[in-house]
């Protein structure tokens, strides 16, 4: 058990609480879990407003990048800005139900998430 009453999860499929600077901002509905990756959909929660602007910025940059098509037409400015925003978001995110530290919490324009964990 962790301090939020949840179990530390291995090959979990379900919902994971997502904290931003210790505040519950929502959950990830997990669709796939491997040793270093968690894939799913972010579901905003009660305190989401504390980070809404950063998530909306990530969605904007991802949408702009995705709209540019395939390489070599890729918009590297949009890609780089999206990566910068993801980096800022990641530094604030905690997943109390996951024992490993978070390397990256990437969110796309559909609120799909790809979470990369450290070994």
Image (cartoon, rainbow, N blue to C red):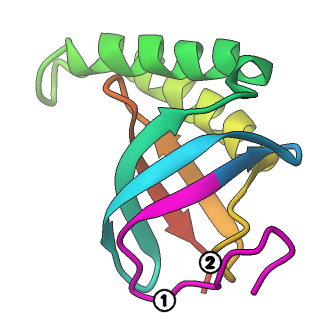
Dot 2 alpha-carbon crowd within 10 angstroms: few under 14, some 14 to 19, many 20 or more: few
Answer with the quarter of the image where residue 13 lies.
Answer: bottom left
Answer with the quarter of the image where residue 62 lies.
Answer: top left
| 92, 12: nearer the viewer | 12
Q: Residue at x 39, y 86 (%)?
A: 11
The residue that mark 2 highlights is: 118
Viewport quadrant of the N terminus: bottom right
Residue 14 rendering spot, x and y as whole percentages: 39, 65
Q: CA distance from mark 2 to mark 1?
A: 14 Å
Does the magenta portion include 2? yes
Give the residues in magenta: 1-17
Foreground label between 2 and 1: 1
Image position of 75 (left or right of 95): left
Q: Residue at x 62, y 77 (%)?
A: 118
Q: Which mark is residue 10?
A: 1
Residue 21 rendering spot, x and y as whole percentages: 88, 43
Residue 33 rendering spot, x and y as whole percentages: 36, 75
Viewport quadrant of the C terminus: bottom right
Does the magenta portion include 66? no
Residue 68 rendering spot, x and y as whole percentages: 20, 13
Q: Residue at x 75, y 48 (%)?
A: 19
Image position of 16 (left or right of 97): left
Q: Is residue 35 above or below residue 75?
A: below
Q: Is residue 17 above or below residue 36?
A: above
């Amino acid at each position: 058990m962790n301090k939020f009453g949840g179990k530390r999860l291995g090959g979990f499929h379900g919902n994971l609480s997502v904290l931003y600077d210790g505040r519950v901002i929502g959950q990830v509905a997990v669709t796939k879990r491997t040793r270093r990756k968690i894939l799913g959909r972010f579901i905003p929660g009660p305190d989401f407003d504390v980070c809404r602007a950063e998530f909306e910025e990530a969605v904007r940059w991802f949408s702009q990048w995705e709209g540019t098509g395939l390489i070599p037409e890729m918009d590297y400015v949009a890609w780089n800005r999206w990566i910068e925003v993801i980096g800022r978001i990641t530094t604030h995110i905690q997943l109390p139900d996951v024992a490993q530290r978070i390397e990256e919490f990437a969110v796309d324009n559909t609120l799909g998430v790809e979470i990369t964990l450290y070994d």
